[in-house]
Image (cartoon, rainbow, N blue to C red):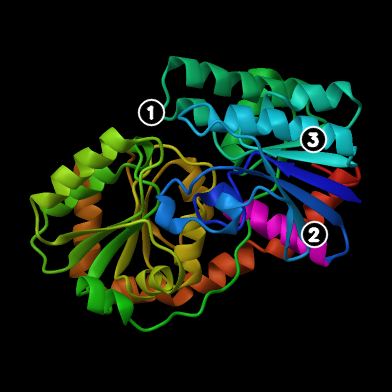
Amino acid sequence: MRIAFIGHKRIPSREGGIEIVVDELATRMAARGEQVVVYNRKGHNVAGEEFDNQSSTSDKPYMYRGVKVIPVTTIDAKGLAALTSSFFATLKAIKARPDVIHYHAEGPCVPLRLAHWFGIRTVATIHGLDWQRAKWGRFASTYLKLGERTAATCADEVIVLSRNVQRYFKDTYGRDVRFIPNGIERNTPVAADAITRKYGLEKDGYVLFLGRIVPEKGVHYLIDAFKRLDTDKKLVIAGGASDSAEYYESIKTAAAADPRIVLTGFTQGEELAELYSNAYVYVLPSDLEGMPMSLLEAMSYGNCCLTSDIPECAEVVGDHAVTFRKGDKDDLADKLGDLIAHPDRVAGLKMGAADYITGEYSWDKVVDQTLAMYRGEEKR
């Protein structure tokens, strides 16, 4: 089967959860003998030019783990990158006539209608209700909503990552969509080394947030709640801005007032593994999510996790983590303070986290379901 992927920024990359998902799907499908093409955006890594690699700078097609990667023209400006890259990628894909084009995220789904008109089977994965994100202005939000509506009305199949969004599509568009969650593999914890030398971080000596520094992630709630706690543990905020420079500056200002708060910026590789491996508690205080890959990754390293109680987080963790009321800084401070005061409870949650998450969410199962859906075999 010939499969095309459109809508991510680029692979290989850790610029966001969508990039991780597309990487996993594309390379695993290629390993099974499928002919897979991904259309990468041109442009620098959102975290900065220092994180660029071949996926950011190449102008020519190349092979990556059995996947053909084709860079496409991109206007690298806020609100225009997804629009332009998905449009030009769609034109290239239509010309190549794959068996299926798989779009990822709401904005890139707008040109899906073109592929539909040309009779190519289209699939859309809605990673979250992106038009609700605070970082977007009116035009961008309207465009994202158009992409959502296009997916709902034109795509042959729509995939969502949570039961909550599945209900939303049924209620809003009368559309039955398929729930296929993300997957995860067990990660082996590593000792603190680089993070000790660079940031002075020790095993169980810090609370960790890891993700994009954007308003809907709720980092401001976490900083406010942490400042209320009398603890010698540090708070590590790991991640870079993503079309949200003003918010990132506000977080830097808030963090500067407390010497216990460490901002690492965008992180990857061994440093990323060390941060996950040695955290006392991982916190995800989001107001809005799709299915957060960082949460799956944190649990796969055996972390005790504390998340907001939005369905997209609560459905993932079940009773294997702690939740607080979304947007409630008082409840967040109480729950985090309780975990800091009760290391035995933290140890108990850590003990079962990796077994639970890797047993519940499997990439092999996700690929099985997705390929069957491409062929029209998968039942809802």
Q: Residue at x 52, y 55 (%)?
A: 293
Q: Mark 2 highlights which residue?
A: 29
- Circles 1 and 3, Cβ within 8 Å, touching? The answer is no
Disc 3 is placed on an element classified as helix
Magenta region includes residue 127:
no
- Sequence-earlier tag: 2 or 1: 2
Task: Identify residue type, mark 2.
Answer: Met
Image location (x, y in percent) of residue 228: 10, 51
Indicate the secondary structure of the residue bearing disc 2: helix
In the image, taking residue 191 as reference, residue 329 lies left or right, namely left
Callout in the foreground (1, 3): 3
Q: Which residue is tagged 1?
A: 134
Looking at numbered disc 3 in the image, what kind of residue is underneath it? Lys
Crowding at dot 1, Cα within 10 Å, few <14 / some 14-19 / many 20+, comes out as: some
Give the magenta range.
20-31
The residue beneath circle 3 is 92
Point 40% across, 50% down: residue: 48
Q: Is residue 142 visible?
A: yes
Residue 354 screen position, x and y as percent: 51, 72
SS type, badge 1? loop
Q: CA distance from mark 2 to mark 1?
A: 35 Å
Figure quadrant of residue 380: top right
